[in-house]
Amino acid sequence: MDTTFSASELERFRHDGYLVAPGMASTATCDAMLAVTQDHLRREVQPVEYEAEVGYAGAPASLDAPGGRTVRRLRSAYQRDDVFRQWAEDPRIVGRLRQCFGEPVCLTLAHHNCVMTKHPHFGTATGWHRDIRYWRFTRPDLVTVWLALGDERADNGGLLVIPGSHRLDISREQLDELDFLRPDVAANQALFAQGRAVELKRGDVLFFHSGLFHAARRNDSEVVKTSVVFAYRGESNAPVTGTRSAAAGDVELG
Ligand SMILES: O=C(O)CCC(=O)C(=O)O
């Protein structure tokens, strides 16, 4: 079992802020996760975040509006089912993250820790942002691990990234009040032009730095896009006491 990035992969991750590890999850694992996801979607097993609660442009106005109960995230994936817990703790993920952080790894339960579902019709687009924008840790240096349970492309709402943008200094004026890159700022137009789609096949895993700007479009296919997403930190990078980042605890993975 390969539990490490090669030296050139690690170098690419550090430079670009993201890296795809193809085929890390087996078909059986993906099937098992999809079965739990579909069951929990059907039964609306809480905690769930609905599109109406995300509040992005084009989202249903309320839970009672058409499409209002479209699920955006099945929250607390780690606590939901063993199949997600085992994935979150997979030694192939932990070993790679230990290389990235240069120290033992902790899973943060406060952020991501979810199954993201992007539905046709009511699933909304997400503007360019850094995950770290509303996370509070000693250093802005976490890694998100995104597993595709089905193929992901720009046209079904797959992620777009700006390579190397985790290393950029961004001025306050470039961001709106929710810390999304403002489309009306010229400097941002140049950044958007560097955006590229990350194509994932079922079972592929995208590792990306919490400072990497990313975005996603609507899902213009007829199939729900499903991704399992966890966030990790190095053990010395503690959440700031009293913030949401510290509220849900974490799991020491060694
Ligand atoms: O699936 C999307 O629309 C983007 C999700 C995302 O980037 C996030 O939740 O941080």
Image (spheres, grey):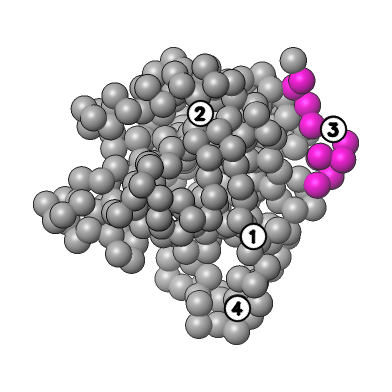
Residue numbers of the magenta segment: 2-12
Q: Earlier in the sequence, mark 1 or mark 2?
A: 1
Residue 48 vertical position relative to residue 222 in the rendered view, above or below: above
Residue type at tag 1: Arg
Disc 1 marks which residue? 196
Picture residue at 44% right of the left edge, 46% below the top:
243
Picture residue at 61% right of the left edge, 56% below the top:
197
Looking at the rendered image, the disc whose residue lies closer to the viewer, 4 or 1, is 1
Q: Earlier in the sequence, mark 4 or mark 2?
A: 4
Quadrant of the drawing holding the N terminus:
top right
- Please identify the quarter of the rendering in which residue 242 is found: top left
Residue 140 vertical position relative to residue 112 in the rendered view, above or below: below
Direction from residue 165 to residue 33 in the image, left or right: left
x%, y% of residue 69?
20, 45
x%, y% of residue 146?
56, 38
On whether ligand 1 comes within 8 Å of the CB at mark 2, the answer is no
Q: Is residue 53 visible?
A: yes
Residue type at tag 2: Asp
Direction from residue 12 to residue 154 in the image, left or right: left
Disc 2 marks which residue? 250
Q: Earlier in the sequence, mark 3 or mark 2?
A: 3
Direction from residue 224 to residue 217 in the image, left or right: right
Disc 4 marks which residue? 189
Disc 3 marks which residue? 6
Picture residue at 37% right of the left edge, 22% below the top:
35
Mark 1 burial class by Cα count in 10 Å: few <14, some 14-19, many 20+: some
